Amino acid sequence: MNRPEFLDWIAEITGAQPVTPDLYVRAATHGSHGQKDYQRLEFLGDRVLGLVIADHLYHQFPQEPEGQLSQRLNGLVSGSVCGEVAKQIGVGNHVLLGKQARDDGARQSVKVLGDVMESLIGAVYIDHGMEAARSFILRHWESRFTATIGDIRHPKSALQEWAAANNRKVPAYELVEKSGPHHDLKFTVRVHVSNIGEVEATASAIQAAETEAAKKFLEKFT
């Protein structure tokens, strides 16, 4: 990493000079490169992103019911969208990776790029505060807020499209468990894509569990 060039880039994308440069270096460090990686910052940035987007949607769409707002939120904070934003601002050019991760193409991985995008949000929040983090997020997500509900792909549709594009069989959903009292049933669903993997998710309805499982699968394997 060329540190001065990296910090100039950080100032460009955030609109402010870094106060704590090492924070941003950590935000761009993959686990394959060293012990001080981006995971804790990613955890924080994910929550900051969700709050900022939810607040913005609440005020921008005052007539929309909770269900539609949730649909917009889920689409805007998804790993795939975070990865797309990261690509647009050149995150892949600055991620610190170990040799094996580089050889495996992690620099182009939507999952890795999305994680780094969230960790950068966490770094801005710690370094400059909530308003700076809000400005950073809205600056790079701005063009996406005007998308119609139909433009925001449902996770199950997105997963099916991804499987088809990668010559895989149609994703298979399986009800694994139904638990809880009649008034508060919980359904655990597993989604499986042949030769790729599987994930499980739990929700209060089968359809919601399938949706969450598809979302988790996309975040984990794409």
Image (spheres, helix red, strand yellow):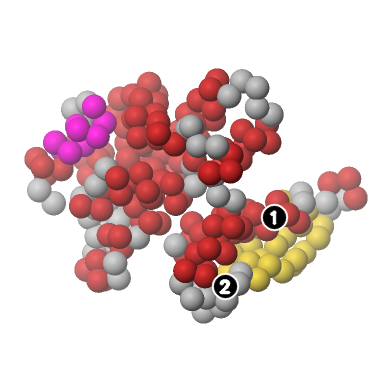
Q: Quadrant of residue 22?
A: top left
Q: Is residue 129 above or below residue 4?
A: above
Identify the mark at residue 139; answer none if there is no mark.
none
Residue 13 is one of the magenta-drawn residues = yes
Residue at label 1? 209
Asked if residue 210 lies left or right of residue 214, the reply is right
Residue 221 % position (x, y): 47, 64
Asked if residue 87 lies left or right of residue 10, the reply is right
The residue at the point 46 percent across, 72 percent down is 166
Residue at label 2? 193
Task: Identify residue type, mark 2.
Answer: Val
The residue at the point 65 percent across, 27 percent down is 64
Q: How far apart, in angstroms, are the residues tagged by discs 2 and 1?
A: 16 Å
- Secondary structure at badge 2 equals strand
Q: If you read the primary sequence from the N terminus, does the residue marked by circle 2 or circle 1 appear first?
A: 2
Asked if residue 123 lies left or right of residue 44, the reply is left
Residue 26 % position (x, y): 26, 46
* 198 or 139: nearer the viewer: 139
Type of secondary structure dominating the magenta stretch: helix
Structural crowding at the residue carrying mark 2, measured as other residues with C-alpha within 10 Å and reported as few (<14), some (14–19) or many (≥20): some
Q: Is residue 189 visible?
A: yes
The residue at the point 32 percent across, 40 percent down is 120
Residue 48 % position (x, y): 45, 33
Task: Identify residue type, mark 1.
Answer: Ala
Q: Quadrant of residue 112?
A: bottom left
Residue 52 % position (x, y): 47, 29
